[in-house]
Amino acid sequence: MMDEEQILIETFGKRNCFKVPDGYFEQLTDSVMAKLPQQPQQQARTVVMRPWYYAAACTLLALVMGGAYYFHQQSSADMVAEGSYYEEVADYAMIDNMDIYACITDEQ
Amino acid sequence: MSQKIDPKAQRAAFERIVREYSEQLYWTVRRIVLNHEDANDVVQNVLMKAWTRLDSFHEDSKMSTWLYRIALNESIDFMRKQKKQQFSADDPSAITIAQQLMADEYFDGTEMEALLHEAIAQLPDVQRTVFNLRYFNELKYSEISEMLHTSEGSLKASYHIAVKKITEYLKQRD
């Protein structure tokens, strides 16, 4: 033990020289309980998804993305197919691009 | 997710905690803030916070340690707010802490004891807290370390410095 600490203890002691009003501690508990809200506030909890929820969510997402890609490809294919149809028609009719353009614009 | 607890049972359990710990919490706070009305306010805040944060008590420390931790944080916060509101130390009309204590109807000590508390009150907040817990509460450094999340080495150094400062202050006032 430090000498200075020992001197403090010998000179001043460690007595509790504070007082409280009569009956303070007897009423403290009741006073505190009367002020408490009905229930402790619930802290925000992190919801942990079960593994199979997580797997199902991933599968659904993959399906949606796959479907979106497929339909996008399909519409592109349709556009290509449509273009090649006109080319076949043009070949069959033995008309060239200028004639097709003239037909479309109705200049003939 | 945590299981649902019966609110009545939870309240009853908390009431038992308040009955068991409120007095020791009060005296720890009182030695820091010195005034009964302030100590009463702080302790009530401590117990309200303990109630609202009951979910955060994880039983990896003792209930008393958890409560003390809240109490010490509240006491330190209170002292910091109080310092902002106090008059300047250069104010000639300001009365000393020892004089305030001697005039306090809820102080039963001698002038020497009042002077000791005045010397303690000059310390920085955390050092003052460490001194009170070690000197008056006679807590082990390991227990204080858990409450304040500070290493035992730092606490020993803090206490040693606190004792020296108090001794110097008392010599100057002699």
Image: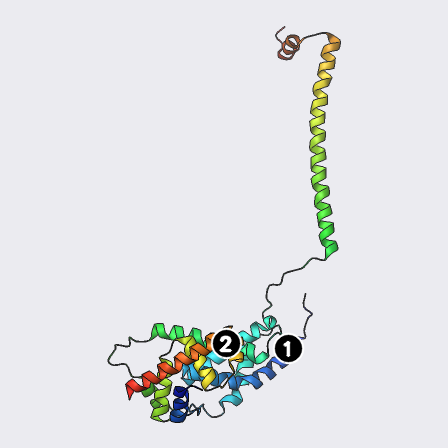
Q: Which residue is mark 1?
A: B10
**Front in this rendered view, residue B58 or A60:** B58
**Front in this rendered view, residue B72 or B167:** B167
**Front in this rendered view, residue B133 or B27:** B133
Determine the image quadrant of residue B107.
bottom left
Image quarter hosting the C terminus of chain B: bottom left
Determine the image quadrant of residue B98.
bottom left
Q: Residue at x 74, y 14 (%)?
A: A88
Count the numbered circles shown: 2
Callout 2, which amino acid? Glu
| Chain of the residue on which disc 1 is drawn | B
Callout 1, which amino acid? Gln
Determine the image quadrant of residue B20.
bottom right
Q: CA distance from mark 1 to mark 2?
A: 35 Å
Residue A81 in the image, given as x and y percentages of width and height: 73, 22
Residue B43 in the image, given as x and y percentages of width and height: 49, 80
Label 1 or label 2, whichever lies nearer to me, is: 2
> Does the image show residue A3?
yes
Residue A29 in the image, given as x and y percentages of width and height: 55, 84
Question: In the shown orientation, is residue B134 left or right of residue A56?
Answer: left
| Chain of the residue on which disc 2 is drawn | B
- Furthest-left residue in this view: B92
Disc 1 crowd rating (10 Å Cα; few below 14, some 14-19, many 20+) is some
Q: Secondary structure at mark 2?
A: helix
Q: Is residue B15 above or below residue A86?
A: below
Q: Which residue is mark 2?
A: B152
**Front in this rendered view, residue A18 or A13:** A13
Q: Residue at x 65, y 75 (%)?
A: B7
First in residue order: circle 1 vs circle 2 = 1
- Furthest-top residue in this view: A108
* Residue A70, numbered circle: none
